[in-house]
Amino acid sequence: MIKKQILKLPFIIFIIILSIFFYLLLIDRNPSKIPSALINNYIPDFEANSLFKSEKFYSSDKFGNEITLVNFFATWCKPCRDEHVYLQRFQNEKGLNIVGINYKDNPEKTKQWLQRLGNPYSNIAIDNKGKIAIDWGVYGIPETFVVSSKGIIKFRHVGPINKKIYNEINSLIKKLE
Amino acid sequence: MIVKKKIIKILFIFLFQFLISGSYAVEPDEILIDKNQEDIARNISQNIRCMVCQNQSIDESNAPLAKDLRILIRDKIKEGKTDKEIYKFLTDRYGDFILLKPPLKLNTYILWFLPFVFLIIGIFIVFLHNKKSKKI
């Protein structure tokens, strides 16, 4: 009798595996989104030229005082334009400090772009070779990080900020405060 | 005659596929002068996932990020960094996902050993089944 039951085992295992596959197919999941290896770590240190300011951008000066949003963007990136309105809302409505990292872009074009759309960034570091992006584990812009007031990365989002992500970041910031 | 033609056709397809799979994306200006160093770089690049295309190594991918990482790996080799240091540099930033082969770690034991568990269960069941049918 027990032996007969054991013979059913492969069938049961098969059903379990099948249901796991179906579950993964049906839930709201994007397999191209990869968790950041930097979550709960200190930000990678970097220095760069600043887009609007004559002095250099040193990450050690700019982080560790208040909650900061770090946004990798470029003018050639269409989704970056789509999320721009949310960055401005963060700055206008919440008074959030936003640091922009201008990824492989033309500085003059970026200045014009920001003049036209508005500038939500308190400071912009120029990453013309994409080296800063690699240090932050960035693989597709736009990417946005939430950095705590102690300089620790708490959240990373790959892709444009939409309503859902905007709310998610807001509630995270409330929790961090 | 028709059979012969068919065989030639199939052979041709095989040969063609072999040619395609042998392709890589390394551009001439990236290649290091030192052949040994270039071999090390190629070897590492073949194990590093292109984060943009995900099922390709950076050795095969034309994505700009893959090119950046290929150059970065070559720069590190020229600086005298070891393979281990280069892998660590990349996984510190991009996580284990950047390795095409998942490393053997506590949280990947299931991934590595489950197939063997299933194999043993399978053998066990076949063995039981045979024993039963022999009795009849």
Image (tube, coloured by chain):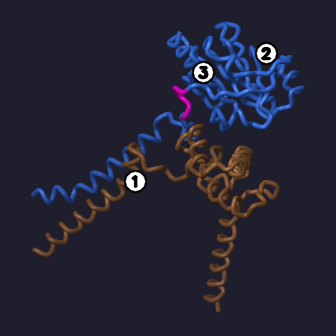
Check disc 1 and give the amino acid type.
Answer: Trp
SS at circle 1: helix
For the residues marked 3 and 2, what is the alpha-carbon distance in whole angstroms?
19 Å
Check disc 2 and give the amino acid type.
Answer: Asn
Check disc 3 and give the amino acid type.
Answer: Val
Per the rendering, the colour in which chain B appears is brown
Say yes or no: labels 3 and 2 on the same chain.
yes
Looking at the picture, does residue B15 appear above or below residue B118?
below
Q: In which quarter of the image is residue A31?
A: top right
- Judging by the rendered image, the residue that carries numbered circle 1 is B112
Q: In which quarter of the image is residue B97?
A: top right
* A159 and A20: which is toward the camera: A159
Q: Is residue B66 visible?
A: no
- Judging by the rendered image, the residue that carries numbered circle 2 is A119
Q: Residue A151 carries which label?
A: none
3 and 2 marks in contact (CB < 8 Å): no
- Label 3 marks which chain's residue? A
Q: Give the range drawn in magenta.
A: A37-41
